[in-house]
């Protein structure tokens, strides 16, 4: 924001600030103490050029300002040094879809704010393999440059607030440097391959020290490589708070790895099937069901192509530090019609049982048949997880169980769409 009048929380009436969901700036610089051309007074009635750049690699917002008294927009150059820089991860503040625009206010003053010219541009770089046999790469010089998002606001007279969008950053990494956090690993290729083969592993990204999850794609089979291409191709285009974010990939010496954001609480299955049930009360369970439904609604109806995950299960639902649910593992994702796995997950969340439970002998060991039996006897709430001790919202529990049954209907055409699930069952926040 460019400020021409002083509020109680501002240093003066001639400054630039970065505001995030508030008029109280996160970072601020007074132009009275800076040089922005031959004149540093925003109130002088002349033209100013402003650039607001956001780089998704270092996650840094920068503001550049140039005094342009003539108002000529031809042959102008952005200053080399920003007048203001601020480190911020915009993913924490912006939804999946945003509107980019400008705003200005005069307050109690009688003045005119005019934006003569403005431009918004995104520079996006993501190189992915286009076949089942992507080129191997071991040279660090092949690392893909990070994404940069740039907003250029030209010839701004008065106060302007810019909303900047975040574009996902995808990179190729040397697999030897992920494990050691940027230092070359001395293990043999076979030893590293075995380490990654033990399941999703935690690693450290070189340069940033960011903790990540690393998943190895099965090696030596065409299906494995097809999985790899499918997952990279699809996930690289998806943006949703309840989908696990793909950060990059490794493809080197026959080893195929995918690098994801790290979610410290692990997968949902250990909280509803194993010994940590006490940590997951009903409010958290219901919230996680809402998270999964939100992710599937986005995949089915809100993205530009219809994607069906086909492998929605408790072990593929990951939990962040606040127990928000995120859907991951897109190796089997396809552009298809309907699937029933959401029903199985919701029943598992509500009942605390696996879809195939050997203790349910009278119901062919199938959880859905067991719940149908209770529903037919008009006592569906008796299917609720005993570990909850009756501490749940009866209306929410009943809705979740009914949604699970509807989505598990044996006739695929009779299953509701995710939009219908939301409208019918109120699984939404």
Image (cartoon, grey):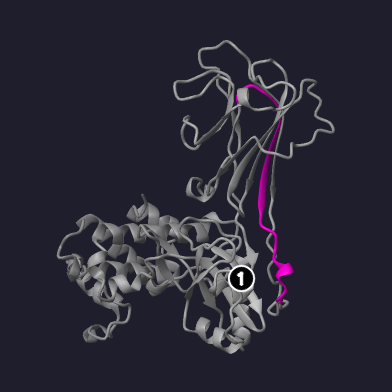
Residue 294 image point, x, y percent: 43, 56
Q: Is residue 162 visible?
A: yes
**In this view of the protein, which residue sits in the foreground, 173 or 40?**
40
Against 295, residue 175 (above or below) is: below
> Which quadrant would residue 361 be assigned to in this image?
bottom left
Residue occupying the far left of the picture: 389
Q: Residue at x 46, y 61 (%)?
A: 296
Left or right, 378 with reference to 338: left
Front one among 295 and 247: 247
Farthest-out residue, front: 33
Disc 1 target residue: 249
Of 79 and 310, nearer the camera is: 79
Q: Which residues are magenta?
A: 137-159
Quarter placement of the N terminus? top right
Residue positioned 55% across, 12% down in the render: 109
Q: Nearer the viewer, residue 303 or 144?
A: 144
Q: How many marks?
A: 1
- Rendered location of residue 13, percent (x, y): 55, 19
Does residue 153 appear left or right of residue 380 in this picture?
Answer: right
User: From this viewpoint, is residue 2 visible?
Assistant: no
Q: Residue furthest right?
A: 75
**Residue 304 position within the rendered picture, expressed as x and y whole percent measured from the top left:** 60, 56
Magenta span has 158? Answer: yes
Q: Is residue 352 above or below residue 94?
A: below
**Secondary element type, mark 1:** strand
Instruction: Tell me where residue 118 appears, x and y as whole percent.
Output: 71, 32
């Amino acid at each position: 924001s460019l400020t021409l009048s002083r509020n109680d929380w501002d240093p003066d009436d001639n400054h630039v600030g970065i505001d995030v969901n508030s008029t109280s700036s996160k970072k601020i610089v007074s132009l009275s103490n800076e040089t922005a051309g031959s004149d540093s007074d925003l109130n002088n009635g002349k033209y100013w050029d402003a650039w607001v750049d956001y780089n998704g690699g270092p996650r840094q917002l920068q503001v550049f300002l140039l005094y342009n008294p003539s108002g000529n927009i031809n042959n102008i150059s952005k200053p080399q040094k920003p007048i203001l820089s601020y480190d911020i991860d915009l993913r924490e503040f912006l939804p999946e879809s945003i509107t980019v625009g400008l705003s200005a206010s005069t307050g109690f003053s009688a003045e005119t704010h005019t934006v003569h010219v403005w431009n918004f541009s995104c520079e996006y770089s993501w190189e992915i393999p286009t076949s089942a046999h992507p080129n191997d790469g071991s040279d660090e010089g092949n690392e893909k440059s990070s994404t940069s998002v740039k907003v250029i606001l030209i010839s701004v007279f008065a106060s302007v607030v810019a909303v900047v969008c975040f574009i996902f950053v995808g990179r190729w990494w040397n697999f030897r440097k992920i494990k050691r956090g940027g230092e070359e690993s001395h293990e043999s290729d076979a030893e590293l391959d075995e380490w990654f083969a033990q399941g999703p592993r935690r690693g450290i990204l070189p340069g940033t020290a960011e903790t990540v999850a690393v998943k190895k794609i099965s090696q030596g089979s065409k299906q494995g490589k097809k999985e790899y291409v499918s997952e990279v191709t699809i996930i690289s285009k998806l943006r949703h708070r309840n989908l696990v974010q793909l950060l990059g990939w490794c493809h080197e010496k026959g080893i195929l790895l995918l690098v994801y954001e790290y979610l410290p609480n692990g997968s949902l299955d250990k909280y509803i099937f194993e010994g940590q049930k006490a940590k997951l009360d009903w409010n958290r369970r219901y919230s996680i069901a809402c998270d999964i439904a939100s992710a599937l609604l986005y995949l089915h109806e809100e993205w530009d192509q219809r994607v069906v995950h086909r492998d929605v299960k408790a072990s593929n639902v990951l939990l962040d530090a606040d127990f928000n649910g995120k859907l991951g593992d897109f190796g089997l994702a396809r552009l298809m019609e309907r699937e029933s796995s959401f029903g199985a997950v919701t029943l598992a969340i509500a009942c605390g049982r696996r879809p195939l439970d050997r203790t349910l002998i009278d119901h062919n060991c199938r959880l859905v048949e067991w719940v149908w039996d209770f529903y037919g006897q008009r006592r569906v709430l008796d299917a609720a997880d005993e570990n909850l001790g009756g501490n749940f919202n009866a209306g929410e529990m009943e809705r979740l169980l009914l949604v699970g049954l509807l989505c598990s209907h044996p006739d695929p055409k009779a299953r509701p769409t995710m939009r219908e699930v939301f409208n019918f069952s109120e699984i939404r926040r």
